[in-house]
Every structure is written in structure tokens, then in C-alpha cells.
Amino acid sequence: KQRVLSGIQPTSSSFHLGNYLGALQYWVTLQDDYDALYFIPDMHAITVAHDPKQLRARTRAAAAQLLAIGIDPKRSTLFVQSQVPEHAELAWVLSCITGFGEASRMTQFKDKSVRQGAENATVGLFTYPVLMAADILLYRPHQVPVGEDQRQHLELTRNLAQRFNTRYKKTFVVPEAHIVKGTAKIYDLQDPTAKMSKSAATDAGLINLLDDPKITAKKVRSAVTDTEREIRYDTEAKPGVSNLLVILSSLTGTPIVTLEKDFEGKGYGDLKSDVADALVEFVTPLRAKVEEYLADQGELDRILAAGAEQAREIAGNTLAQVYDRVGFLAR
Ligand code: TYM
């Protein structure tokens, strides 16, 4: 069996629709055919200012959401990054084969550091992509399901894997980014040219999975569209309408061409109303399941501890090889 691995940060109390449609929905389906490892990168979450108590709560909330969407700990390994110390250890080795210039070209660092004021950005935020490469390479996955915004980090990961393999000995699998074209970038409902993100200036265009469904429906009804009337997929001319079509198509499993036909002669209000209904139908049972998982914290922590143990078996193996190959004495 080939392997998949991916991670989602616990930087908010709820995942958003972009996370789900761009990545998480594929995590669930890939479990069927792959040996799957999914984790919560809490070490990445401390690269920016954070509250410790909140981080702990958000890490558990992330685990509960992953279980609720259908990540099955019997079939997949679900774990928290900081419970597997090999991530930090491999990150150090990889940082020693990463060029300073190479790291400086990571656009996400540029974006995030500009927001914080470049002088205040942490070194951790700067080396974040190297830790991400370690997250991946430790498990030798073939596929890494992510959204478009992670493509450059995956490219760096592939380069580091190849570099290590040639400099020392073939150690890492060079992973492929599993990015699904139609859903790779879900847009903000208020600014359909910007990706949906929890760091947007306002949250009016952000659909959180755990929000009150009434709020979600309201946000959909006030989504920005355009001054035409035609419901047609055209990302250039009609980014708002196209985004709504992508969302509806993904949630209902109906191809966009079919939706275009169904909406012939109908208006934007009808489209929004269908998107709102599909979302409410999706999030309502999800919220209930998340509540259930969160209610039994002991069980949640046990699932994560078991996941970390399984992950460490793989990660420990890879790290031992890496340490040997770079010339460290055996522990
Ligand atoms: P994170 O936590 O920001 O996002 C989790 C996943 O959601 C995707 N995503 C989107 N997809 C489509 N449209 C959007 N608007 C949208 N917003 C977010 C992201 O691409 C991602 O797949 N660096 C990673 C976490 C990470 C990781 C890893 C991922 C750390 N180590 C190793 C894979 C492998 C991140 O910050 O994702």
C-alpha cells in the first residue's frame, strides 16, 4: 500500500470550509486506498503569538473535528506533532541542508511576516517550511493532500528529499503534492479573489464549520457576486459565482456543468439559497459529532496517544537512519 500524510494547524477553534473542501475531504477518501497518517501540527502553531490554554483546547478541538468528518483511527494514524519528538529532531538536520536564500523565497513567510512587521517575525516562522518538510519526510509518504497554498512548501520538501538522498544515500521518498484542481483554492465569500482564510481582515466571508448554521446561511446569502444575472462558471469574469458553484458542486457531488443547466433561468438568490441549504445540511450533524468527541476528553487523549505511539515507530526508524547517515554516533 502507498502512504499518504497530511496535517492541519490548530490555529482556530473551528476548521473552515476552505480547509475541508481543499484538503480534509480528500483525507477521508484517501483512507480507503492508502496507509494514511494525519496529524495536528501544534509546533507550527507556536510560530506566531498564541495563548497556551487556547492552544491545548484547539488541539483537542482539531482532533474532535477530524474524527467527526470521518478520519477513522482504526484505519488511519491520527496524532499530535509535539507528541512525536522526531519531528523537531529531523527538522534540525534538514535545516542544515536548506539554503538561507532558499528559505527566504517562501512566499507564505513573506506574507505572514509582513502582517506582523518583518522585525517581529520569529525565526520559528522563518524555518517553518523546514519543520513541515521534516513532518512529511519522516513517514516517507507518496502523496500529501493539501490545498494550493501549500504547493511551494511541498516543492521545498521534494528538493530537500532529493538533496539529502544524493548527498548521503537514498533515504527519503520524494513525495507528490496531491492537489485537486477544482477545490485547491476556495475563496473568501466577501472577496472572491482572495483565498478563504482565518487571517482575513473580517470574518464575513469565512465559513467556519462549527459556526451556528444560521450565521453560515446568512454569510452565504450576503456573498459577493457580480452585476450580471447568469449562473456560469467563469473564474475570471465571475469569481464569486464560480466559488459558490464549486462549493455547491463539492458538497452535493453534482458536476458544475449540471448545476449550470439546473440554474438556467434562475437567479443568484436561488444559487445562494441552495449553497446555504447544502452547508447547513453538512454542518449540522458534524457539530453534534464534534460535541460528542469533545465530551469524552479521556478517550480523545487516548486516541491521540495511541496515534503518537504508532507514528513514533515509523518516525524513529527514519530518524535513526538519518542520524547514522549524517555521521552521528548511535544512541
Ligand atoms: P493549514 O492548517 O493552514 O491548512 C490545512 C489545509 O487546508 C488547506 N487550505 C485550503 N484549501 C483550499 N482553499 C482554501 N481557502 C484553503 N485554506 C487552507 C491547506 O492548503 C492545507 O492543506 N503548513 C500546513 C500544515 C502542515 C502540513 C504539514 C501539511 C504542517 N506540516 C505536513 C501537510 C504536511 C498549514 O498551515 O495548513
Image (tube, rainbow, N blue to C red):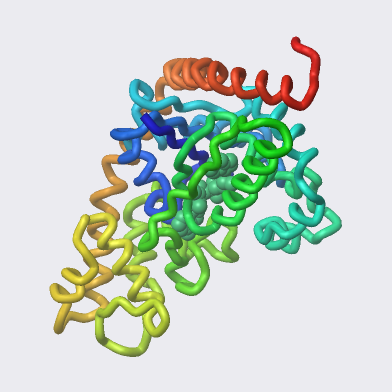
Residue depicted at x 60% and y 46%:
158
> Is residue 328 left or right of 8 when viewed as pictured?
right
Relative to 81, residue 222 above or below:
below
Relative to 310, residue 277 above or below:
below
How many discs appear? Answer: 0
User: In the image shown, does 41 or 55 lie closer to the viewer?
Assistant: 41
Q: Is residue 10 visible?
A: no
Q: Quadrant of the N terminus?
A: top left
Residue depicted at x 57% and y 37%:
136
Q: Quadrant of residue 214?
A: bottom left
Residue 244 at what x, y percent from top left?
33, 68
User: In the image shown, does 116 or 320 lie closer to the viewer?
Assistant: 320
The residue furthest bottom is 228
Residue 174 at what x, y percent from top left?
55, 41
> Is residue 3 left or right of 128 when viewed as pictured?
left
Residue 59 at what x, y percent from top left?
54, 33
> Is residue 235 left or right of 53 when viewed as pictured?
left
Residue 58 at what x, y percent from top left?
54, 36
The residue furthest right is 119
User: In the image shown, does 235 or 119 lie closer to the viewer?
Assistant: 235
Q: Quadrant of the C terminus?
A: top right
Residue depicted at x 41% and y 35%:
66
Q: Is residue 236 visible?
A: yes
Residue depicted at x 69% and y 43%:
163
Q: Quadrant of residue 86?
A: top right
